[in-house]
Image (tube, rainbow, N blue to C red):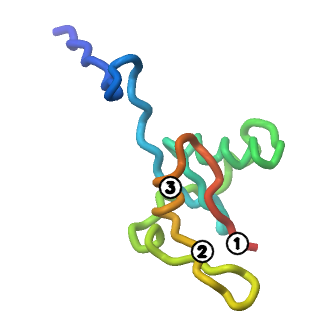
Amino acid sequence: MPEEKQADPFELNGSQPARPALLCFQVGDQDWVAAIDEAGARQVLEEMNGKEPGAYHDWDVELSTESMLDKQWVEEDPPHAECGCLRQWLAEATEPTYLAGVE
């Protein structure tokens, strides 16, 4: 039996398909990015760092936990003021992008 094609979801203006929701992924031990999937998370780092496609294929990528999304980040320099959380930065993202990292 052939599968029935589902209609693409549309944005409120009805002119184009809605973009898939961005998720927050931890890539490696020190970087968090907004992306649609694991491959997209690696691609954000590749593009940001000027690397060839596949340069981060062996890096671990994990979907960020709820507690990590809500953890407040602080400035590196004293007085270490709070500067936001991953959930806030993810909500502000409109396309796949780098969110935060530590050294």
How many dots with numbers?
A: 3
Q: Nearer the viewer, mark 3 or mark 2?
A: 2
User: Residue 36's spot in the image, x, y percent?
Assistant: 49, 42
Residue drawn at (32%, 28%), measured in percent from left and top? 12
Ranked by sequence position, the earlier of labels 3 and 2 is 2
Residue 62, horizontal then vertical, whole percent = 51, 58
Vertical position of residue 40 compared to residue 76: above or below: above
The answer to which of 10 and 22 lies nearer the viewer is 10
Mark 1 Cα shell of 10 Å, populated few (<14), some (14-19), many (≥20): few
- Residue on which disc 1 sits: 102
* Residue type indicated by callout 3: Leu
Q: Which residue is mark 2?
A: 83
Q: CA distance from mark 3 to mark 2?
A: 14 Å
Residue 36 marker:
none
How far is the residue under mark 1 from the one under mark 3? 17 Å
Work out whether mark 1 precedes mark 2 in sequence or the reverse, and give the earlier one.
2
Residue of label 3: 90
